[in-house]
Image: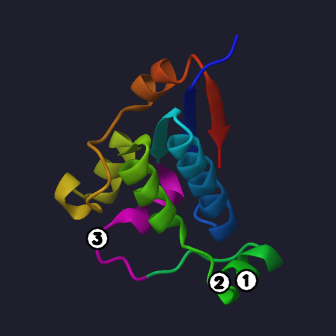
Amino acid sequence: MSSDKISVMVTSGNREQLQMAAMVASVGAVSGNDVTVFLSMNALKFFVKGATESAPAEGEMGKLLEEKNVPEFKELFEQAVEYGDATISPCSMAVDILGISEDDLESFISEPMGLTSFLSDASEGQVWHF
C-alpha cells in the first residue's frame, strides 16, 4: 500500500538533523506529497522570528554544510510550504513551555498542533523522525 503522505517529527537542535528533516520535507512536498512537519523540543527555538543562534554542528558534515553555503534548513522548510503541499506546525506543549505565541514564529509556520493530533494524522503514510 503506497501513500502520498509524509509526516516528519523534528526534535533535534543539531544542524545535520534539521537539514535532513528539511530536505525530506521539501523534496517530499515538491514531489506532490502531503507533508506535515511537527517541530518540538530543541528544534523549535530556531523558528522564532529574529532568532540569531545557529544550530550547532554535530559532526564534520554539519561543518561542511556551513562552509559550502548549502541552503539553510529554514529556507528549505519555507520552500516546502511555498512550492509544495507542506504544513509546518509547532508542538503546542513546546510553544507553551517556551512562552511563545504564534506571532513570534516565522511566517511559514502554521498554528500549533498537539502530539495526539500529529500521531493521528501520521498513522497512514511515511513517518520520519529527526
Tell me the amino acid under the disc marked 1: Lys
- Stretch in magenta: 40-52
The residue beneath circle 1 is 63
Query: What element does badge 2 sit on?
Result: helix
Of pointers 1 and 3, the one earlier in the residue sequence = 3
Q: Is residue 124 above or below residue 37?
A: above
Report the disc number at residue 113.
none
**Disc 2 or disc 3, which is closer to the eye?**
2
In magenta stretch: residue 56: no
How far apart marks 1 and 3 lie (CA) works out to 24 Å
Report the disc number at residue 66.
2
* Picture quarter with the N terminus: top right
Q: Residue 44 falls in which quadrant of the image?
A: bottom left
How far apart marks 2 and 3 lie (CA) works out to 21 Å
The residue beneath circle 3 is 49
Of pointers 2 and 3, the one earlier in the residue sequence = 3
Tell me the amino acid under the disc marked 2: Glu
In the displayed image of the protein, which residue is found farthest to the left? 103
Q: Determine if residue 28 is in view.
A: yes
Residue 93 in picture, x, y percent from top left: 36, 42
Task: Give me the residue at 62% from left, 48% from top.
Answer: 24
Q: Residue 123 falls in which quadrant of the image?
A: top right
Tell me the amino acid under the disc marked 3: Lys
Q: Which of these two is toward me, 117 or 110? A: 110
**Figure colour scheme:** rainbow
Number of other residues with Cα within 10 Å of mark 3, as a class: few under 14, some 14 to 19, many 20 or more: few
Is there a contact, CB below 8 Å, between mark 2 and mark 3?
Answer: no
Number of other residues with Cα within 10 Å of mark 1, as a class: few under 14, some 14 to 19, many 20 or more: some
